[in-house]
Every structure is written in C-alpha cells, then in structure tokens.
Image: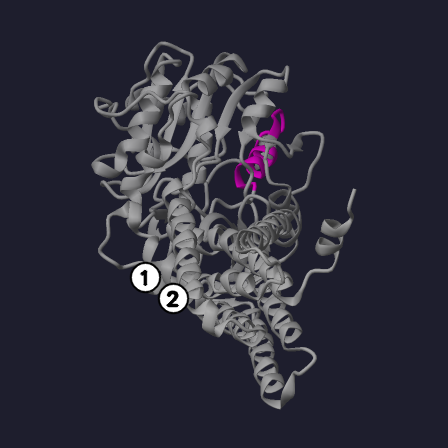
Amino acid sequence: MSTAPWREWRRPTKPEAAVFVSGVVSMGLEILAGRMIAPQFGSSIYTWGSIIGVFLAALSYGYHRGGKQAAARATNERMARAFLLTAAYVAGLVVAGDLLLRSTAGFPLPSRFASLPAVALLFGPPTYLLGFVSPYAAELSTKRDLGEASGHVYALGTVGSIVGAFATTYALIPAFGIDQIAFVFGALSVATAVGLYLPDVGRDRAAASGAVAAVLVVALAGGAAGITVEGRVVHESQTPYQELRVVDSVDTRTLYLDGQRHSAMDLEEPYRHVFDYTRYFHLPLLMTGDVDRVLFVGGGGFTGPKRFVRDYPNVTVDVAEIDPEVVSTAKEYFSLEESDRLNVYTEGGRQFLRETNRTYDLVVLDAYRKDKVPFQLTTVEFMRLASDRLDDDGVLFANLISAPTGPASEFYRAEYRTMRRVFPQVYGFPTAGGGIVQNVEVVATKNATRLTEAELLARNDRRDVGVNLSREIRSYRSPPPTDGVPVLRDDHAPVDSLLDPMVGQRYVIQETEPNATADATTPASVAATGPPTQVARESDGSAPPSARAVRSG
C-alpha cells in the first residue's frame, strides 16, 4: 500500500497548515463566545442558536468572498494578512469586549434574538476573515484535481475545528480565563501569519506582525488588571460549567456565576445572611417536626449549609454541587469547612438523589438561575425522586428566579403546577413583592394539611429556629393560576421557553438593611446586574447558636 497520503498529512504545505489553524481558531472562538455572551444574555438555547448561526453565516460569507477572489489574489501573504487582522480584532475583544457587549443590550429586539447583535458584532468580523483562508488554500494547493484539492483543504479545516473544540473545552477553559484564552487564539494567529511570511519576512511584514503581537500583549495586561465596575476581582476562572468570579466591594465578597450574583458573604460577619432570600431557607423548619438531615442541591458560596451547621447542632448537612471549582472556591474564599456534619459531594443533584440510600427531612434546591436552569431538576420525575428521598413529613424547598405574576411568571407557575402533581401542598413566597423578576421561594410538603399564614406566624412565635421569620411569612401568597403553563416532564420540559419572557428584565435581589433587628428587617432592592452596595448587617435578636435546636411545637 502506498504511503504517499500519509506523507501528505505529515508534511502539510503552508496553506494547508493555515487551513488547519483557521479551523482551530474559529471553533475555539465559537466556544469562547458562549462564555463571553452568557453573563449579559444567558446561555439558553436561543443564545447558542445565535452563536452557531452567526459563525456559520460569517464563515459562509468569507468562503464566498474568498472564493471569488482566490483565482486572482490567493497568496500566502494575503492569508497572513487575514490572520493578523483576526488577531488584532481579538485584541480588541480583550480590551473592549465587555463594553461592546453591554452596548448591544438595549437593542429593541424580541428576547429570543436579544443576543444576536452582540454575537454578530463581537465575532462576525474575525470569523469572516478566517473564512478567506480555505478557498485561498484550495487555490494554492499542489493537488492537480480541483475536487481533490477542495476536499483535502476542507478536511484539514474540519480536523482543525475538532482540535479547537476539544482543546478549548477540555484544556483551555478549565485552566484559563476568557482574556487569556482569547490571547492564545490571537497569538496562534500571529504565529501562523509569520509562518506564512517565511522565509521572506521583510521589514514591513515583521513590523506588522510585531505590532499586532504587541497590541495583544498590552490588551492582555490591561484586561487582567482585576478591577470591574462591581469591585476588585480576587479570583476568576473558567470552569467546565460556567464563568466564575469572586469580587470584593467594601466589606462584601460576592460570587458571580456567568456574570450573575449568586452568593455573598460579609467579610466581617461570615455567617450573616447578606442576600435576604437565604433567610427563607429556615422557613421549612416551621412546616415539619424534628430535622436531623438536610440536603442542599447547589452550593455556590454555601451560605445556607454553613448557617445550618452553625445554628443547629443536631443537624447533618449534605451538599451536592456539580462544579468542583465552585467547591474549591468556597473553601478558599467563603470560609467553607467540611466536617462530619457538613459533607460536600461533587456531583449533580439528581444523580446524587438517585444513588443515595439516605432520607432527608429537608431538601433545598438552590441550583436555578435566571437564564440557566438544569431542566432535569424541574420535572415531575425529579420531584417524585425527591419525594422518595424525603421522610414522611419531609419538605422540599426550591429557590426559583422568576416573577410571581405577569408574563415573566411562566417558569414559577409551571414549576408550581409540576410540584403539585407530586406533593399534597405547595406554598409560594415572593421575596421582593410586585411583578418584578426576583427570588420566589416555593415550599412543597408531604403533609396534606395546608398551613395558613396565621398558623405559620404562631409557630414562628413558639419555635426557635435561629431566625425571626415573621416578615418572610407575611410574603405568603395564594396559589398562582397554572392554566396555560405545562407540567414539566423529562420528555418535554421547555424551560428555555418559560425563561424567555424574563430576558432583558432586571433581576432584583433583596439585601438586609444595616443593623436591623429581626422584627424590623427591611430588605433593600438591588438589581442583580448592577454594582453591589455596601452590605447590610442583620441581627436576629435570638438566642446564641449553641442554645438552638430544631424542635416541633
């Protein structure tokens, strides 16, 4: 058998190597686009559809234009220029990507298409430029037959795309931040341009390549300064699941996941409830008897688990957090310490519940975001699994992000309807009031007797659960209308469609006021996308933690 084809792959020509690199860079940028766009527009199916569509359109237009010019203009030098221009644009993304992203957020488009201008502006031009490479390389190919040349070139480009996809996903994103990854693709483009110029680089070509390389380095240095509008970045990384940042502002440390505030900790009082919704985690303790074991699905900054372990000496807390980087970040920056009463498992919540043989008095679902909801944690099948893992008087608590009423309430109402298919009683507690997008706490019980607001207030007076919940109880709402929303099932859970009405709306997180007593705590409304204010201090006005126990009464 002839070894000629193997030699061709082992010794690619300069145009063939350029095609391979163009595939690596274009696919790498496409995956990186998802991480850059998500903080502003989320990572729903509509966002990814826009990304894929824009990249395909830009490449196609580049193929078209390059193909028309290839016969007369295809040279290694012109391909090198395409790579240098791509690298220069990537440097611009490092410097001004966030500004460009925010500037496109106000376009008057339907929510499903909101991310389209941003994707086109940020990634259309460099992808278009890379589209010129393949037709130029086909024209410069040493293959005699046009079909063979085209097939060989596009095979190389596809192999490059495969390498770019795997390298970005499994190597670059877990190890580096967005700016560093963009720098890698820019530097690779410059190196390819220099390789195409060799051996006759010349003064002008060397100057152009050096200038673009210098711009990349300056952009990386400026982009890595560690200062944002939210505060000082003390840690950031790209995990396999999301972009993660830890930001300090005044005396508050905040965990951002894909650009959204997820958890906060007072640096002077690490156990204080900074975000008001975390106080509601204690509400189920008024709806059941003795609580011995609690499961949190989703860790974040571990506000709830840490507080439960501190306040309730008889309670053991398990946490299922799918992202190992979130766990390690919580240990380093949010005072998380594992113990025989606080166990952390790095696996998905549904997988953990399916595999464990334990039962729980309380399961807290804290893994939902405004734009990104793991649908497998929303369905009837999951609710049945959770019910099976709860004791006879167990309680399921879900921290949803939705509006309680109006068009943006579809997700809340669908989840409420879904829970009612499994649990005898379901309660809703909006945390901010009105019809704005906010944290809506949904509590489902296996006890068929429905508790009234007055009964919960009476239990709050009798029991000591470490937090005076009178204000939280008064956010009690009647069951929402569920006509027009689906029951979520494993084979049909249109979560993205249900979240769609919230795109472009402000998500408001409540914070506690400074030095407020438990009876007079008034939360401060703060838009989740805005800069954090100085975090309030809160006093529960209750007994020392060591004296508290979770008892029925």
Read off the residue under disc 1: 104
Say which mark, if any, is on residue 414. none
Q: Nearer the viewer, residue 402 or 18?
A: 18
Residue 111 at x, y percent in the picture: 28, 47
Q: How is the image coloured?
A: one colour
Residue range in magenta is 302-318
Residue 34 at x, y percent in the picture: 47, 51
Whole-number angstrom distance, CA of label 2 to CA of label 1: 7 Å
Q: Nearer the viewer, residue 202 or 534?
A: 202
Read off the residue under disc 2: 100
Q: Is residue 497 magenta?
A: no
Please indicate whether residue 38 sits to the left or right of residue 440 in the image.
right
Residue 526 at x, y percent in the picture: 35, 53
Asked whether the viewer can see residue 471, the reply is: no
What is the secondary structure assignment of the residue under circle 2? helix
Q: Residue at coordinates 26% horizontally, 28% vertically from top-left?
A: 477
Q: Is residue 303 magenta?
A: yes
Asked whether the viewer can see residue 39, the reply is: yes
Q: Amino acid at mark 1?
A: Thr
The quadrant where residue 431 appears:
top left
**Label pair 2/1, CB-CB below 8 angstroms:** yes
Q: Residues within 10 Å of mark 1 (few under 14, many from 20)?
A: some
Question: From what the image shows, is residue 289 above or below residue 229?
Answer: above
Q: Residue at coordinates 23% horizontally, 41% vertically from top-left?
A: 434
